[in-house]
Amino acid sequence: MTAQPTGIATPPSSSTDLLDLVTRFSTEMGAMTDPDALSERVIQELCRAGAATHGALYLLDREHECYRRAGTVGPLAKSGLPAVLPLTHPIPHHLSATPRTASGAELVSPASLKELAEAGQAAMATMQAERSLPHVSRGRLIAFSLLGAPLHPERDQGSMTSFLCALAQTATNALDASMLLDDLHRSHLLMKRTDRLKSLETIAGGFAHEIRNPLTSIKTFIQLAPERKDDPDFIREFSRIVLDDVYRIERLIEEILDYARYMEPKLTEEDVNDIVSSCLYFIEVKADSRGIKIEKELASDLPRVMLDRQQIKQVFLNLFLNALDAMSEQGGTLRVRTRTLIKPGGKQWVQIETEDTGHGIQDVNLEHIFDPFFTTKHESGEHEGTGLGLTIVHQIIQEHQGEIEVRSTVGVGTTFLVNLPAVPS
């Protein structure tokens, strides 16, 4: 008697057992989204139901135009079944061409192997696979399962065939949904990359415009230096201008690289108050030297947030330093508040408010505040604004599924509101 391989349980026998198995299987499939994990679970259940010695599920890989082995049962499947089968392989080619039943699943029994081409028969024999189950959705073979010899050939093959077809159709629906979800995720990433390419096109044009003046001054200095080398006033003044322009170009390049370097947030559960306090501590000396007072009101019962700590620190530091710059001439007050928001549906958000008493932003400029290379800072030299800081801030908040809003009144000040979704309690 053939020994039952490890992992193959005794198949259900009664109608009640079969119904319970299908119900449980359907529930499990509905909760799984990863195609590979789903494939493993499907082939395990099919082998169990069919009492197969071994088995494998091959999943359609549209990118590489092949079927790849996504799940196996039994050591023979891992060693004897190829990892990849081309679309033109006799087995998937036959399963794609075979008419489907009303349920969309068609079982190829040993008797019908005669219909396969000679190469297909040799392939099935080499793999020691006696049954194949196609997983067809919307007229396309999205996957197929190969099962080894049944451990209990004396069982009613008719009822076993019907049962396997029912399980195969349930698996097909789950695999199709999982692949559609995967396609949606890929499309979303592609759209994000496309948006970034469009932004980089804008940035490239802005960069060319921004460095034209610094390059002109550097070029002029190089041209005049040989004949004015004995003029100390000229050398001293022009050297200062050129050095400031070199600093500006360096900063532009650094910020463009920061923006262009796509970084998926590495999310961890964090206390926003802790990050805000850390950033305020960092700017205290600079604020004090400019006569700027810092006030903070941090909610004690603030829910935690899933975020990338370093990226969010970059956001807060940018907003805080911008506020200091807006008050650098006359001093003022920087107020930072955190609070909990309850949005429609009862979902909790964390809001971080940054308010300054600076010169404010004109209404005509507010709608462009997050545009690449848009700046309201016009100081010359090293501290001139590059216009990329708030663009990067906006990008980071979007990557965190959050929101950012700006309100400003000329002569009164500016307020930035950052909203981040909280971890459900």
Image (spheres, helix red, strand yellow):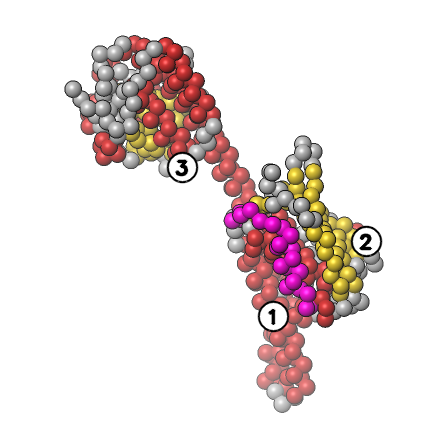
Residue 80 x/y as whole percent = 22, 32
Where 304 sits versus 289, above or below?
Answer: above
Dominant SS in magenta = helix
**Disc 1: CA contacts within 10 A as few (<14), some (14-19) or many (>=20):** some
Q: Residue 215: name its quadrant.
A: bottom right
Number of the label disc, if any, that sits on residue 247: 1
Q: Is residue 239 left or right of residue 80?
A: right
Counting from the top left corner in percent of width and height, residue 365 is at 75, 53
Residue at x 69%, y 37% (from the top left corner): 343
Residue with the most extreme left position: 1
Which is nearer the N-term, disc 1 or disc 3? 3
Looking at the figure, which quarter contains the C terminus? top right
The amino acid marked with disc number 2 is Thr
Which residue shows up at 23% across the image and 16% down it? Answer: 152
Question: Looking at the image, do the residues carrying marks 2 and 1 touch, with CB atoms under 8 Å apart?
Answer: no
In the rendered view of the protein, which quadrant contains the N terminus? top left
Query: Image quarter for residue 81?
Result: top left
Which residue lies under the disc numbered 3? 63
Element under disc 3: loop
Q: State which region is magenta.
A: 265-286
Please indicate, yes or no, whether residue 299 appears anywhere in the rendered image: yes
**Element assignment for label 2:** strand
The answer to whether residue 254 is above or below residue 7 is below
User: Is 271 contained in the magenta span?
Assistant: yes
According to the picture, the residue beneath numbered tag 2 turns out to be 409
Whether pointer 2 and pointer 3 mark residues with C-beta atoms closer than 8 Å, the reply is: no
